[in-house]
Image: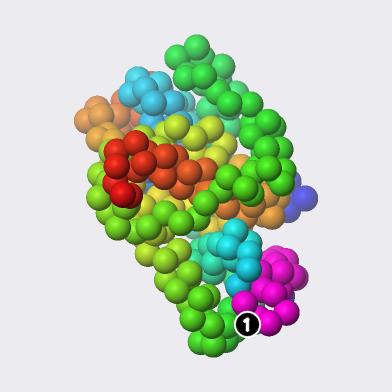
Amino acid sequence: MSEFSEWFEQTFKNCYCEQGNLVDQDRFSEIAQLVLDNEADEESLKLFEQKLKNCMQTSGRFAEEKNLRECIKDKLSQFKQDIPGDLAKSIRNSING
Amino acid sequence: MAETQEEAVRQNYTEKEKASIFDTEFMTHVDSMYNFAYRLTFDEDDAKDLVQDTYLKAFRFINSFERGTNAKAWLFRILKNSFINEFRKKSKQPAKVDYNEVESYYNSDEAGENITTDLRVETVQHMIGDEITGALNALPVDFRTVIILSDLEGFTYEEMAKILDIPIGTVRSRLHRARNMLREKLISYAKEMGYNN
């Protein structure tokens, strides 16, 4: 059982109303992020995937969450600070000196 | 605590082994270390000093490092601690939002009303990396840090918990809040620029 099993089950349940409709977008987003971060255990993932198959709203919301995350991640990764050319050398000098 | 046990295992490396570990396991992360340092300090010289200081400490305490374990997480932890203990006090740092204030705001019911998750991918696609980086940089440092560690450096929640000295549940919730805050910033930026009309 992973760290988040109980939390996942409870939070997932609270995302939906009695009729099974997605009613809490913010809670769902927290659940989706855990899945996208590969931190959900197998059982939680099964529960989640089952819902994805049966609920259009859930699968649409998850796809949106996933695309948005990837887009932000890609753009952030592209913007990296250039490392000063002499940094590695000065590190080596400081440990040897 | 597991971490205390980890720290208690001391190695006894020869000078040759130390040099080899330093080169093959530590120096390979210098790029990521510098980028992390820069995203914390926003200053090239401070970032350079912070990285240099981290490597010096890593070398000094190399016997606390077990060869073949996660060197990157170990180095990031040293860097984060150095930043908190030494660099964060510097006046060069931009004004900080009180962490507890932000955390309690995002825990309150009031926050839920303002958080909107409807930031469409097309809107973000129109933005350039620089604008998104600007939004990330505007986050309070503790929230910015979890996004960098997770989304840019690919650390797991467990590794982040060790680097930041916080429970894994706090990593999950802080990351969620940080991403919501980033979205809010991007939404207001998009509105200002007329992206989402």
- What is the quadrant of residue A39 in the picture? bottom right
Q: Position of residue B75 (x, y in %)?
A: 49, 41
Against A37, residue A92 (above or below) is above
How many residues crowd mark 1 within 10 Å: few (<14), some (14–19), many (20+)?
Answer: few
Q: Position of residue B33 (x, y in %)?
A: 40, 39
Check if residue B11 falls in the magenta segment: no
Question: Who is closer to the viewer here, B108 or B142?
Answer: B108
Question: Who is closer to the viewer here, B177 or A24?
Answer: A24
Say what secondary structure mark 1 lies in.
Answer: helix
Residue at the front extreme of this rendering: B197
Q: Residue at x 72, y 43 (%)?
A: B108
Q: Residue at x 57, y 36 (%)?
A: B142
Total number of numbered labels? Answer: 1
- What is the quadrant of residue A85 in the picture? top left
The residue that disc 1 covers is: A47
Check if residue A18 falls in the magenta segment: yes
Give the magenta range: A3-21
Q: Residue at x 63, y 64 (%)?
A: A24
Q: Is residue A77 visible?
A: no
Question: Who is closer to the viewer here, A77 or B65?
Answer: A77
Q: Position of residue B125 (x, y in %)?
A: 27, 54
Q: Position of residue B121 (x, y in %)?
A: 34, 59
Chain to which mark 1 belongs: A
Against B189, residue A13 (above or below) is below
Q: Is residue A6 visible?
A: yes
Against B90, residue A3 (above or below) is below
The colour scheme of the drawn protein is: rainbow
B88 relative position to B124: left or right: right
Q: Amino acid at mark 1?
A: Leu
Residue at the left extreme of this rendering: A85
Residue at the top extreme of this rendering: B91
